[in-house]
Image (cartoon, rainbow, N blue to C red):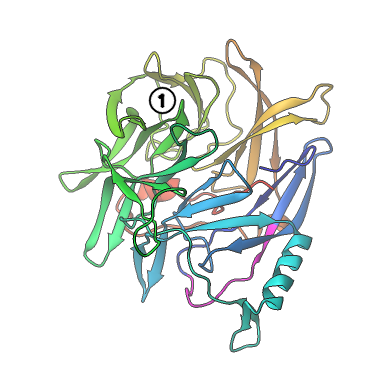
């Protein structure tokens, strides 16, 4: 993550699934920058270089890699002849500033790696994907980055659960698989994803985090007796990389905890995780909860601090030592971006007391239509529309958010 002084920038690179897969998209994407010191918002452009596809599929799962300015995008959903299917495709994207983008486009042209479409528009020549496809097509899943045992700078990528739609129907997955970029290759020089132990409970639309190099997931949707059921956020599973096995737990759940779907979580200590927003399938919440993996509990924080608006499916970031307007001291900020169907905005918080984990609400910024008219919208997705409330939950700002 590149953080320039007090600036924070996000770029919209996701598209709904209803796109022409044969048409290459422009590589310059609108971005919005915000200066915490002055409160100024400024539109701009970022250049995205991709391995293969013309867009980031809707309901794909992505992660920013620890090393370099790369993002790994896995799965997602696409449309073919008016039908929607899950994808097993994986690829990398890189985010560059505007001038660097022009340099890259020139270099592609110089090397003969660009061509023109029927209308004379310049588009990239076809590239060979460098990441193997997953064993299971999926969307509405999660991907996590884990440190490879015995190394200090090599990482593994674990893909977990999700939803599957194909010509035979649809379902919810518990299958998991791991990709090792430095792993072995077959006789054709190709790598592959390794299928590992499945989750105890099939689930999609869940939340999760990595703590102490273990993966924790909670909440989401599952299928029981051919009916969709909402899993409460106290239904937790943990994947231990040492054993490559899952264990399930039932945490103690506090009163009025309703963050079972689409909550956003952030580990803040070796045992505590902050949980922002989420939904119970009918109503989106503005509450903030805390999960304790030692006490095996999840409950709303005791202070009155909360989100400015209800949010589900928001993006979380931590920005270090930011100069904030009207504040004499620099602060580490937790930014909660998007997740509300009525506005494009973000809240930002600071941890007031590391011992008590007390949060301080610092402020909010809402972007007006001049910046966001082209990138906001309301989308419903096929396959789980019989739960109307879940469709409503997913009506949040349709962006994959990257920090430049």
Residue 284 in the figure: left or right of residue 96: left
Magenta stretch: includes residue 25: yes
Magenta stretch: includes residue 4: no
Residue 321 visible in the current orientation: yes
Residue 188 quadrant: bottom left
Q: Is residue 112 above or below residue 320?
A: below
Q: Which residues are magenta?
A: 19-30
For the image, the number of numbered tags is 1
Q: Which residue is mark 1?
A: 257
In the foreground, 162 or 127: 127
The dominant secondary structure in magenta is loop
Classify mark 1: residues with Cα within 10 Å, few (<14), some (14-19) or many (20+). many
Q: Is residue 332 above or below residue 19?
A: above
Residue ID at (53%, 71%): 127
Outermost residue toward the left?
A: 225
Residue 131 quadrant: bottom left
């Amino acid at each position: 993550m590149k953080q320039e002084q007090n600036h924070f920038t996000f770029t919209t690179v996701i598209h709904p699934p209803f796109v022409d897969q044969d048409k290459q998209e422009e590589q310059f994407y609108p971005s919005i920058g915000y200066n915490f010191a002055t409160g100024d918002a400024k539109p701009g452009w970022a250049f995205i270089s991709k391995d293969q596809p013309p867009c980031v599929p809707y309901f794909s799962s992505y992660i920013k890699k620890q090393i370099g300015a790369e993002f790994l995008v896995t799965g997602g959903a696409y449309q073919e002849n008016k039908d929607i299917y899950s994808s097993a495709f994986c690829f990398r994207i890189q985010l560059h500033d505007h001038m660097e983008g022009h340099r890259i486009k020139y270099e592609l042209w110089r090397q003969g790696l660009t061509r023109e479409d029927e209308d004379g528009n310049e588009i990239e020549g076809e590239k060979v994907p460098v990441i193997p496809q997953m064993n299971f097509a999926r969307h509405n899943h999660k991907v996590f980055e884990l440190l490879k045992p015995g190394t200090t700078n090599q990482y593994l990528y674990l893909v977990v659960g999700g939803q599957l739609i194909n010509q035979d129907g649809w379902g919810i997955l518990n299958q998991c698989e791991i990709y090792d970029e430095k792993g072995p290759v077959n006789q054709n020089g190709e790598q592959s994803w390794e299928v590992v132990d499945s989750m105890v409970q099939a689930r999609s639309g869940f939340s999760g985090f990595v703590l102490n190099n273990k993966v924790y997931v909670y909440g989401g949707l599952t299928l029981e007796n051919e009916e969709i059921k909402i899993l409460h956020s106290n239904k937790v599973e943990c994947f231990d990389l040492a054993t490559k096995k899952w264990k399930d737990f039932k945490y103690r759940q506090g009163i009025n905890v309703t963050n079972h779907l689409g909550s956003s979580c952030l580990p803040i200590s070796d045992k505590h995780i902050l949980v922002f927003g989420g939904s119970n399938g009918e109503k989106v919440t503005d509450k903030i909860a805390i999960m304790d993996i030692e006490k095996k509990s999840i409950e709303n924080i005791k202070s009155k601090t909360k989100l400015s608006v209800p949010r589900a499916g928001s993006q979380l970031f931590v920005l270090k030592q930011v100069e904030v307007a009207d504040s004499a001291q620099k602060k580490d900020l937790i930014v909660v971006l998007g997740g509300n169907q009525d506005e494009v905005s973000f809240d930002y918080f600071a941890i007031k007391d590391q011992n008590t984990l007390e949060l301080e609400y610092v402020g909010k910024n809402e972007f007006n239509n001049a910046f966001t008219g082209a990138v906001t919208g309301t989308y419903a997705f096929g396959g789980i529309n019989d739960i109307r409330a879940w469709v409503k939950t997913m009506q949040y700002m349709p962006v994959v958010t990257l920090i430049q």
